[in-house]
Amino acid sequence: KQEVTQIPAALSVPEGENLVLNCSFTDSAIYNLQWFRQDPGKGLTSLLLIQSSQREQTSGRLNASLDKSSGRSTLYIAASQPGDSATYLCAGSFQKLVFGTGTRLLVSP
Amino acid sequence: DTGVSQNPRHKITKRGQNVTFRCDPISEHNRLYWYRQTLGQGPEFLTYFQNEAQLEKSRLLSDRFSAERPKGSFSTLEIQRTEQGDSAMYLCASSPGLAAGALGFFGPGTRLTVL
């Protein structure tokens, strides 16, 4: 069964900290790994897409890595800001996306 | 093209009523997906289409749910005899057909509240 797990479920940090969100998946036959941001009551915004042949992707203060052999991905957020507060979801791409339950991030000023 | 659109954005209905949601994908994408998300959970797959063909349905999609994509463009998701447990955010996504694996181009979602 294709499962995606995210830890921690929730994270609270002061502004300026660097932080790491973790995602693990059970099926290494993954095509891609995608990270999303979701604000309360809103839809999903794609942050980063890592194709299976890649090991990492960067966008601004965000860096995501992918290790298919260990079934893990991490999202690194540098110099966190209050505007980063949201739920972060990772999804393994197969014929469909399989999502984790997300990490709720709160960055305090 | 401005992306995936969904209508309505919000729907409040009484238990037992039927509801229908519409999704318009990115025009050049031939794959279309429906997901459901409840509070505190990640989106769960419901069904997907390649052009007009419905290729996979989740066990979550009971016989009260039906999805169509008659001309391979927009799609509708109908829920008959709604129950309170159907209250959720219904998300639609589209993906290029040539991509290996699903890519997540999501619409804003339709939030359903069943009273």
Image (cartoon, coloured by chain):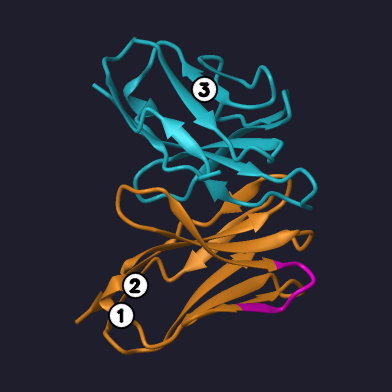
Chain colours: A orange, B cyan
Do tag 1 and tag 2 residues touch (Cβ < 8 Å)? yes
Q: Which disc number belongs to residue B77?
A: 3
Discs 3 and 2 share one subunit: no
The kind of secondary structure element at disc 2 is helix
Q: Chain of mark 1?
A: A
Q: Which residues are magenta?
A: A51-57
Residue B46, image quadrant: top right
Residue B80 at what x, y percent from top left?
Answer: 45, 12
Q: Chain of mark 2?
A: A
Q: Which disc number belongs to residue A81?
A: 1
Q: Within 10 Å of the Cα at label 1, are there few (<14), some (14-19), or many (20+) other Cα atoms?
A: some
Residue B100 at what x, y percent from top left?
Answer: 79, 53
Residue position marked by numbered label 2 in the rendering:
A84
Discs 1 and 2 share one subunit: yes
The kind of secondary structure element at disc 1 is loop
Q: Is residue A89 above or below residue B91?
A: below
For badge 2, the amino acid type reads Asp
Q: Chain of mark 3?
A: B
State the residue at coordinates (58%, 25%).
B75
